[in-house]
Image (cartoon, grey):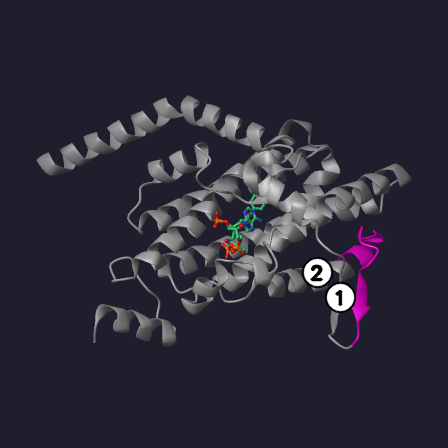
Amino acid sequence: MTDLEKFNDKIANNIKIEPKDWMPDDYRKHLQRQMSQHAHSEIIGMQPEGNWVLRAPTMRAKVILLAKIQDEAGHGLYLYSAAETLGKSRDTYIEELQTGKAKYSSIFNYPTLSWADMGAVGWLVDGAAIVNQVSLQRTSYGPYARSMVRICKEESFHQRQGYEIIATLAKGTPKQKEMAQDALNRFWWPSIMMFGPHDADSYRSSNAMEWKIKLESNDALRQSFIDKTVPQAELLGLTIPDPDLKWNEERGSYDFGEINWEEFWNVVKGNGPCNKQRIKHHVKAHENGKWVREAANAYAKKQKEIKKAS
Ligand code: FAQ
């Protein structure tokens, strides 16, 4: 069997591809792109929430939010480590993010304007992320699949944390309910854009499906998220901001309105409300953390020397 035949055989039999296995160059590049984008999303995704740590309404809410943001940092770390097994360094991935060569999820380019947005981010953004990531637990690359298992466990806590914030506001005073509705109005469409373009325009999908990197299509995952989330909004007495949203008895799913693709591509290309601010902040934090990285590397080097000498 040639290397390619062995690779194809593993994919066909759902045997994970591991870092030292032979893999086609395009498979490796596809994963480097997707996994690093995923890692960048986790790290940039800390910023909209970090915005509210000092303004959380109670100590309990603050501690929970802090724990959630730390989890996102952890997710970024697992994903960068997993992506490094593909033969590219974390420094290179970060440089690609900071120079605009690599993307991160469009959702994190929207501002978080009120405390209710912390609810909307947890409920909708983490909710959408889970739907995608549960499917990625079965992805063909071993380190990516394994990182998803742990990440999904933590994301489900995040989704509940957000739902609790939204539910508290939705059941509160009329002003609080208005805040919850306003957050839903602003985050609904960007959340369903997270799943990417319609299948017909998803130019990465055919390879990804063939290699079992992606197991479900953008539209299938988006539909699953919508079907799960609409009843939750109804339970809260909130209205999804889509006049075309309607249960389709025949399909057993919700029909929904047209997504504003012009807005989506505009954000993806770097022209969303917060793209420039997010990267500027990342560069600043990265520069401020240089001495920590240097100290940690020096410590690790010294430990190695001591171990070698003993
Ligand atoms: N944003 O052909 P497709 C989280 C790009 S989870 C920006 O459909 P693909 C948790 C796409 O890269 C969020 N760009 O591409 C959290 C491609 O451009 P390229 C992150 C997007 O890869 C919660 C082009 O459009 N999750 O952060 C987006 O097959 C709360 C054509 O698209 C993941 O990354 C978008 N939304 O499908 C953290 C999951 N959609 O690269 C903090 C892993 C598409 O050729 C707080 N990734 N594009 O220049 C995936 O599942 C896939 O990569 C998709 C896109 C579904 C995102």
| Lower sequence index among marks 1 and 2 | 2
Residue 75 shown left or right of residue 28 in the figure:
right
Q: Nearer the viewer, residue 82 or 70?
A: 82
Q: Does residue 106 appear to the left or right of 90 in the view shown?
A: right
Residue 34 in magenta stretch: no
Can residue 107 be seen here? no
Residue sitting at 73 percent across and 44 percent down?
A: 165
User: In this view of the protein, which residue sits in the foreground, 247 or 80?
Assistant: 247
Q: Which residue is mark 1?
A: 254
Q: Position of residue 256 (x, y in %)?
A: 76, 60
- Quote the CA–CA distance across marks 1 and 2: 7 Å
Residue at image x 44%, y 32%?
A: 98
The amino acid type of the residue labelled 1 equals Tyr
**Residue 252 screen position, x and y as percent:** 74, 74
Name above or below for residue 243 compared with residue 117: below
Residue at figure coordinates x 80%, y 41% from the top left: 182
Asked if residue 242 can be seen in this view, the reply is: yes
Q: Nearer the viewer, residue 190 or 171?
A: 190
Q: Would the CB of label 2 be found within 8 Å of ligand 1?
A: no
Residue at the disc numbered 2: 226
Q: Quadrant of the N terminus?
A: bottom left
Q: Which residues make up the magenta segment? A: 232-249
> Local crowd at mark 2 within 10 Å, few (<14), some, or many (≥20)?
many
The answer to whether residue 130 is left or right of residue 212 is right
Q: Is residue 259 left or right of residue 286?
A: right
For the residue labelled by badge 2, is the local secondary structure a helix, a strand or a loop?
A: helix
Q: Are marks 1 and 2 in contact (CB under 8 Å)?
A: yes
Identify residue type, mark 2: Ile
The x, y position of residue 2, in whole percent, is: 21, 72
Q: How many numbered circles does the render carry?
A: 2
Q: Position of residue 136 (x, y in %)?
A: 49, 61
Q: Quadrant of residue 257?
A: bottom right
